[in-house]
Amino acid sequence: MATDLLLGRIVSVTGAVATVRINRAAGAGAPDQAVATGIGVGAMIKIRVGRNFVFASVDRVFPSGGHDEFLDAEVSLVGEGSQSDTGQLLDFRRGVSQYPFPGDEVVSTSSADWAKVFRLENTSTITLGDIHATPDVKASLNLDALLSKHFAVLGSTGVGKSTTVAALLHKILDAAPNGHVVLIDPHGEYAAAFRDNSIHLDVETLKLPFWLMNFEEHAEAFLTSEGASRERDRDILGKSLLHVRQKNYLNIDIERVTADSPVPYFISDLLEELELEAGRLEKSADASRYIRLKLKMEEVWRDPRYGFMFGEGLMATDSMGDLLSKLLRIPTQGKPLTILDVSGMPSEIVSVVVSMISRLVFDYSIWSRGEKNVPILLVCEEAQRYLPREDGHPKSAAQRNFERIAKEGRKHGISLGLISQRPSDLSESVLSQCGSLFVLRLTTERDQHFIKSAVPDWAHGVVSGISALRNRECIVFGEAVPMPVRVAIDFLDEARRPSSSDPDFTASWNELQEDPGMVGRVISRWRNQRRDA
């Protein structure tokens, strides 16, 4: 027989919001920790409604006027479940079919209830950590719902965001070891966490031929003008790029070549085409546009920092198949994760590289119809860099590609994972496409308000506590979980953590630095743009 603790009764109901009058002494001394802490803001309570339990989230607790022994609580209705003849919870489902009525009993939610809610049957699941206040109950996530409807991990710097991402990816890859995951790593911190099951691509190991850029990416890489001048320069570049692609010197089987076609060409041919076009013009002012564009291309081409895109070996061969196989892990070969480390790349080209990678992932998924289904997860750290909040400025190629993936990717088997430390700077339209959110501690009021505006009204009670979360804690809500829940994320072994820990100033500054060759080695790596030099 269930022994739920009576907390109080319903006073009023307005739509999906109800007011509960609670006895101040309710829950005191209860042996079940979930019951003892069950009447605070963010907690879940049950309301007896006929043969059902209606679950509600506590949004606000305040004194009951003229009744010192009572408190009033405002709660939002979340879902419901059936109860057995003995009063036990049998199941849980979102939404409410039968609303409570004033006078209905409000009872505690026990650890057994949490276990029943998060016992996801007939689905592929992973467990991220322990449910807050119920350390013996794991928070299960529906893996297919998580991946098929995009997700975001949001949290301020230093609260364990990178570790949370690593933990989530470890759980996903442990459950699906033949997955296909691409992680864009702007700080070079994730390779340490996935030594055995990933490949690491950086400026030294990535071979990303320049001719794989589409027209928009060429324009972003080479054009420096603005306004009307930029539009004229775009026309010049588009015309010249089309001419050199149409040469198709490798005789690739293609019916129609456009400026966007991934057909190899020599950069020297493009430079020559620009020079020829300039020579055909009578006005020196118009010719100078070609010359300016040509000089910019030569500058990039000859800069050794861009060798991963413009190296000699990338010009004469069609390496598109090898690149896609390596990038998308087809076949997996025991390493389902590709970590694209952009930390050592020139800042001027990073956005173009990210645009190329995201577009290649999307285009491959579109043109692989009819082949074996290979869903792909694309995870983007520092997502606000490439998906900024709409401000009226022209969108970058990367932003347009990510927006397209967010809106259309699910139809083509692409899952998007966005990671951001400044969610208020993130595109609202893209974030709204994420079916699941993992929210860690957010310290700025702007970020907190942004999250509240992004979640349903009934989740505000849970989300209101985001500023009080501890490190390695997050609130999960959305399609992957039955109801919003606060989770203490499982501890990761040292070998499975990213290299993102804060420096220990005190310990470091209490040690003598007696290595006379250290500065010289740093300068050598700096000059050679090689971390192992």
Image (tube, rainbow, N blue to C red):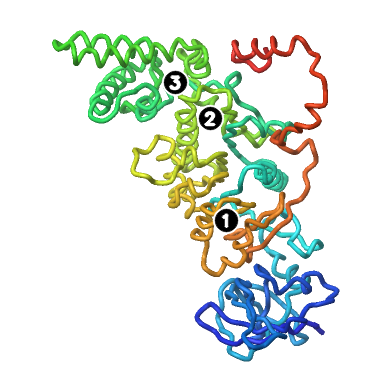
Amino acid type indicated by mark 1: Ser
Q: Does residue 492 lie above or below 480 as drawn?
A: above
- Which is nearer the N-term, disc 1 or disc 3? 3
| Residue 8 visible in image | yes
Tag shown at residue 436 = 1
Tell me the SS state at disc 3: helix
Tag shown at residue 324 = 2
Residue sitting at x 63%, y 81%: 72
Left or right of residue 420: residue 293: left
User: Given this view, does label 1 or label 3 mark the residue nearer the observer?
Assistant: 1
Tell me the SS state at disc 1: strand
Quadrant showing the N terminus: bottom right
Q: Quadrant of residue 134?
A: bottom right
State if disc 3 and disc 1 touch (CB < 8 Å): no
Quadrant showing the C terminus: top right
Left or right of residue 374: residue 160: right
| Residue 176 visible in image | no
Residue 478 place in picture, x, y as percent: 57, 60
Amino acid type indicated by mark 3: Phe
Measured in 3D between alpha carbons, the distance from the residue under mark 3 to the one under mark 2, in whole angstroms, is: 15 Å
Amino acid type indicated by mark 2: Leu
Q: Nearer the viewer, residue 508 or 182?
A: 508
Q: Residues within 10 Å of mark 3 (few under 14, many from 20)?
A: many
- Which is nearer the N-term, disc 3 or disc 2? 3
Residue sitting at x 59%, y 72%: 78
- Which is nearer the N-term, disc 2 or disc 1? 2
Residue 186 place in picture, x, y as percent: 58, 32
Mark 3 lies on residue: 210
Q: Residues within 10 Å of mark 1 (few under 14, many from 20)?
A: many
Q: Quadrant of residue 158?
A: top right
Measured in 3D between alpha carbons, the distance from the residue under mark 1 to the one under mark 3, in whole angstroms, is: 36 Å
